[in-house]
Image (cartoon, grey):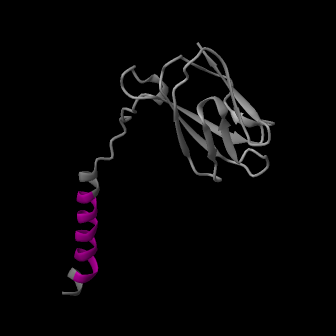
Amino acid sequence: MRLFSKIIKPLLALAATAAVLSQQGCSKEPKAEPPPAEARKSGAGPRVISLSVTEKGYEPSPITLKKDEPVMLVVTRKTEQTCATEIIMKEHGVNAPLPLNTPVEIAFTPNKTGTLTYGCAMGQMISGTFMVE
C-alpha cells in the first residue's frame, strides 16, 4: 500500500495534469488579431482614434480626418506633469475632463475642412490639431 501512496498517486496526478494541459491547446500558431481601429471600413461605425496626453502634449498630432466622417476619440492622460487635464474642442462643444490613466471616449463629426485645434483649458496652451480634408 505504501508503494501506491508514494509512487502511483504522484504519477496519477502528473498524468491528470498533462491531460488537462493538452486539452487547453498550447498551440504556437499566432491567433488572428482584429484589424486596427483605423482600418475599419466606412459604414462600420465611427473611426476610432487613440490619443495620449504625455509630457510632450497630445500625441499623435496632427491627425488627418475626413469631413463628415464620425470619429470616436479615446483619450488617455498618462502624466500629471502638464496642465492638460481636460480636452476642449470649442467648434464641437467638447469639454471633457481627463482623469489620470483612464480612457475617455469623445464622439464628434468634423463638419468643415481645414485645421481643427483642440487643447487644454488654459487657452489651449497645450494643443493638438486635426487636419480635416
The residue lying furthest to the bottom in this view is 1
What's the residue at 33%, 41% (across, down)?
27
- In this picture, residue 20 sits left or right of residue 115: left
Total labels drawn: 0
Please determine whether, in this image, residue 21 is positioned above or below residue 77: below
Q: Nearer the viewer, residue 66 or 53?
A: 66
Q: Position of residue 70 (x, y in %)?
A: 47, 26
Which contiguous range is marked in magenta?
Answer: 5-20
Q: Residue at x 68, y 33 (%)?
A: 59
Q: Is 14 included in the stretch rendered in magenta?
A: yes
**In the rendered view, would you say 110 is above or below 89?**
above
Q: Is residue 43 left or right of residue 117?
A: left
Query: What is the quadrant of the N terminus in the image?
Result: bottom left
Asked which quadrant contains residue 4, the reply is bottom left
Q: Residue at x 77, y 42 (%)?
A: 55
Is 105 rendered above or below residue 8? above
| Residue 30 pos. (x, y %) | 38, 34
The answer to whether residue 28 is magenta is no
Q: Is residue 10 left or right of residue 127?
A: left
x and y, in percent, of residue 18 in the image: 27, 59
Q: Relative to 89, is 19 on the left or the right?
A: left
Task: Work out which residue is located at the far left of the displayed protein and give it.
Answer: 1
The majority secondary structure of the magenta stretch comes to helix
Q: Quadrant of residue 57?
A: top right
Residue at 35% from the left image edge and 35% from the top image edge: 29
* Horizontal and vertical percent position of residue 19: 23, 58
Q: In front here: 19 or 36? A: 36
